[in-house]
Structure formats: C-alpha cells, structure tokens
Image (cartoon, helix red, strand yellow):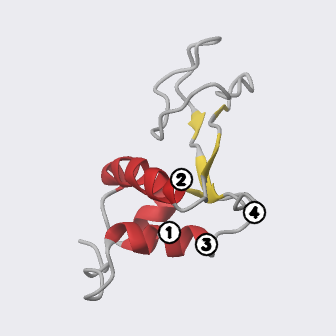
Amino acid sequence: MSDRGPQPRGTTVRGALEAALAAAPEQGLTARELSAAVGIPEKDVAEHLVHLEKSLKALGGRLELLPAECLACGFVFKDRKRFTRPGACPQCRATRIDAPAFRLGHRGP
C-alpha cells in the first residue's frame, strides 16, 4: 500500500511534475523520484513527461534528459531520446542500468 494521496484539486499531474522538476537538484530527478513526488505510478511518468516536454517547448522552455548509464561498463546512452530506462547495455549486455534523470532546462532568449 502507498501513503501517497491524490493530487490536490486544481493541480494537474503535469503541473505537479513541472513543479517537482523546478525544485529538482542539479542532477535532476529519476522517474522513480518523480513518481514518489507526484503520487503516480512510475510506469506512467514517461508518458506524462512526453506531453510536458511539448508544453514546455511551446512556452520557450525545455525538459533536459540526463542520460542513463550502464553500471557494469560505463556506457552512456547519450543518443537515446526515450524517457524510459533501457533494458540492457548495447556494449556489454548487462541489465544493471542507472536510470535517466530529468530537469528543467533554461529558457531561451
């Protein structure tokens, strides 16, 4: 059982995600951390982030993706655009992958 409750009325999930990301440390927040902060299942975070990214882009902001990294060989998934954790490393095939993190980027001029 979870002690997380529903979002207060007037707060959308994406609004809550944006607020959590705005308060995030420099290293960003993982999907698991965002899930705990907002009170939604971890598997739903990526879908909401896709839509949040579009909204931020329309307003001149951006969502930064800090890439996942293989814990076995150090491979960095720098070209990966999906917001989910990779299943296995393409170099060593290990499945111990450090999750990607997210943070709000700086607004453009």
Q: Classify mark 3: residues with Cα within 10 Å, few (<14), some (14-19) or many (20+).
A: few
> Is tag 4's residue or tag 1's residue first in the polypeptide sequence?
1
Give the amino acid type for the residue marked by disc 4 in the picture. Answer: Glu
Q: In x, y percent, where is residue 91?
A: 65, 11
**Image disc number at residue 18:** 1
The span from disc 4 to disc 3 (Cα, nearest Å) is 10 Å
Give the amino acid type for the residue marked by disc 2 in the picture. Answer: Lys
The span from disc 4 to disc 2 (Cα, nearest Å) is 20 Å
Can you identify the residue that label 2 sits on?
57
Q: In x, y percent, where is residue 75?
A: 71, 23
Q: Nearer the viewer, mark 4 or mark 3?
A: 3
Query: Mark 4 near mark 1, Cβ–Cβ under 8 Å?
Result: no
What residue is rendered at 65% in x and 38% in y? 67
Q: In the picture shown, does residue 62 fall above or below 59?
A: above
Can you identify the residue that label 3 sits on?
22
**Nearest the eye: 30 or 14:** 14
Looking at the rendered structure, the secondary structure element under dot 2 is helix
Query: Mark 3 near mark 1, Cβ–Cβ under 8 Å?
Result: yes
The span from disc 3 to disc 1 (Cα, nearest Å) is 6 Å
